[in-house]
Image: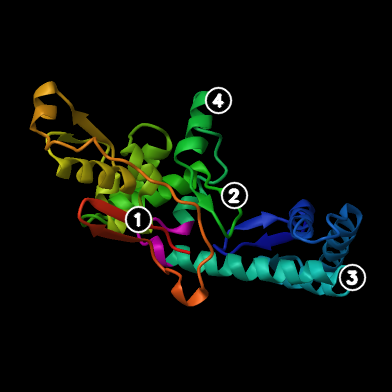
Amino acid sequence: MLKVIKRDNTVQYFDQQKIINAITQAMRETIKGVDQELATRIAQKIEQDLKDSVESVTVADIQERVETELMNSERKEVAKVYILYREQRDKLRELARENHKLLTDEFISQYKHLPNPFPTILGQFVFYRTYSRWLPLEKRREYWWETVRRAVEFNCNLVRTSQQEAEALYDNVYHLRQFLAGRTLWTGGTEVSLKYPMSNFNCSFTVLDKFSAFKDLFYLLMIGAGVGVRVLKADVEKLPKVRTNIKIIHEAYLPVPKEQREDLTSVKFQKDTADLRGRD
């Protein structure tokens, strides 16, 4: 039986359906849509050609044959989509190799096809709704094993961690025996988590007794941290008084010559009047 050598050097038996799935996925991105018959015919031809010539083949060899068959078909636009998708996947794998230093592809491969670890459908729903990040190149959300990898790598890069410890943490988190902060599951390993580490904090707290506290409140909320507040009558009494006798005047928009238009919103004060103008 024909064998396929994967990128991590593991070996699997040839599966025609994987070729069909890859071709139909590319077809969905085209105007003409999916041609199941053509996809099946190409997959069958590739399988037969390989069986007649070799006993084993690499994933890259199969992909080259798919590109060739698509270019020789009447659906050349599918070949273009397939080639671009393959390039994106190669870039994604390279990026993953750069980002994942402790958890190797060989280690992670044993978790990719394990049974769903969530004990209930509700738990699985909460994961996809709350913690699974969108993967633009893949055009899908993360699977559980990918979310855990991202979050564990982030945690283990905060302090010096051995590969053995990182793998043990991954195994525990994957099997729900150990838990990271929920916000780390969501933001860990992202650009935000590196620029604004406070986004990983589940709990922060402030007393709303001065206007600067509102600045802290909204800043923390905007970067993703959880914020609790205290608002007592005694706190409110400490806040500076705010004028309420303000009259707001709306004026209809009148055309303005191009050279006089505002690029930015402006605020001008004249005695007791503030003139606020939006950008044109």
What residue is disc 1 on? 276
The majority secondary structure of the magenta stretch comes to: loop
Label 1 vs 3, first from the N-terminus? 3
> Which mark is in front, 4 or 1?
1
What residue is rendered at 63% in x and 58% in y? Answer: 11
Tell me: 113 left or right of 4.
left
Query: Rounded to the nearest whole Å, what is the CA distance between mark 4 and mark 1?
Result: 52 Å
Q: Position of residue 18 (x, y in %)?
A: 74, 54
Whether residues under marks 2 and 3 lie with C-beta atoms below 8 angstroms apart, the answer is: no
Q: Amino acid at mark 3?
A: Ser
Label 4 vs 2, first from the N-terminus? 4
Numbered mark located on residue 79 in the image: none
State the SS at label 2: strand
Picture quarter containing residue 41? bottom right
Numbered mark located on residue 140 in the image: 2
Label 4 vs 1, first from the N-terminus? 4
Residue 163 seen in render: no
Query: Rounded to the nearest whole Å, what is the CA distance between mark 4 and mark 2?
Result: 19 Å
Q: Is residue 4 magenta?
A: no
Q: Amino acid at mark 1?
A: Leu
Q: Position of residue 9 (x, y in %)?
A: 57, 63
Q: Position of residue 144 (x, y in %)?
A: 49, 42
Start and end of the magenta stretch?
Answer: 98-105
